[in-house]
Image (cartoon, grey):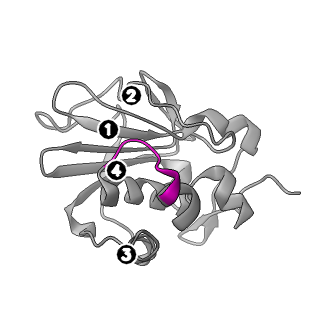
């Protein structure tokens, strides 16, 4: 059984992938500080769902707009609209892709938070939402859609009905699908 995720493509170039076992602790969720709510995606593998506090080493781009140090704003690539539609369809929930502010940490396999290294993070404060993705994963459908699903559900945890069964947006279920 091949435990490597399929190499994602962005702009015609394959992105590097680490073995699943190496990436296992990196899909988890947590609640940020104060009014800020966040979800951090950790690397693939174990399927363990960590509910510890997350969002660390934050670098506010503007007051109360938390993103990790080194993150830069991006326009959502066109394929994100297709992925968002797929995520809405599997979840049975409608959302607005346009309300998400997208950031990427260029050239990064992971970015640091208080909860450890992450490949993706969803954060919400009031009616504002941010998704940050490590640069090496910005073209990885499962990572991006996993964060989109957090946005649609508005939750930090990983309800199995949505993440495991309906949408299969965990490392373990993605590899099975």
**CA separation, marks 1 and 3?**
22 Å
Q: Earlier in the sequence, mark 1 or mark 3?
A: 1
**CA separation, marks 4 and 3?**
14 Å
**CA separation, marks 1 and 2?**
7 Å
Q: Earlier in the sequence, mark 2 or mark 3?
A: 2
* Magenta span of residues: 155-161
Closer mark to the observer between disc 4 and disc 1: 1
Q: Position of residue 143 (x, y in %)?
A: 52, 55
| Residue wearing tag 3 | 81
| Residue wearing tag 1 | 38
Question: Where is 57 relative to 135, above or below?
Answer: above
Question: Where is 37 relative to 126, above or below?
Answer: above
Q: Earlier in the sequence, mark 4 or mark 3?
A: 3
Whether residues under marks 1 and 2 lie with C-beta atoms below 8 angstroms apart, the answer is: yes
Please tell me whether mark 2 sits on a helix, a strand or a loop.
Answer: loop
**CA separation, marks 2 and 3?**
27 Å
The quarter holding residue 7 reads bottom right
| Residue wearing tag 2 | 54
| Quadrant that contains the C terminus | bottom right
Q: Residue at x 25, y 58 (%)?
A: 100
């Amino acid at each position: 059984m091949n435990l490597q995720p399929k190499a994602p493509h962005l702009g015609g170039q394959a992105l590097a992938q680490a073995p699943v076992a190496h990436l296992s602790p990196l899909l988890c969720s947590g609640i940020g500080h104060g009014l800020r709510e966040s979800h951090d995606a950790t690397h693939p593998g174990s399927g363990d769902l960590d509910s510890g506090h997350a969002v660390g080493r934050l670098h506010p781009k503007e007051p109360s707009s938390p993103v990790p140090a080194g993150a830069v704003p991006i326009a959502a690539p066109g394929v994100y609209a297709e992925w968002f539609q797929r995520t809405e369809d599997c979840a049975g929930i409608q959302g607005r892709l346009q309300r998400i502010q997208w950031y990427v940490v260029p050239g990064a396999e992971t970015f640091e938070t208080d909860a450890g290294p992450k490949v993706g993070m969803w954060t919400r404060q009031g009616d504002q939402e941010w998704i940050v993705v490590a640069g090496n994963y910005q073209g990885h459908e499962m990572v991006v859609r996993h964060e989109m699903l957090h946005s649609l559900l508005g939750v930090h945890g990983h309800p199995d009905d949505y993440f495991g069964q309906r949408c299969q947006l965990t490392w373990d279920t993605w590899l099975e699908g």
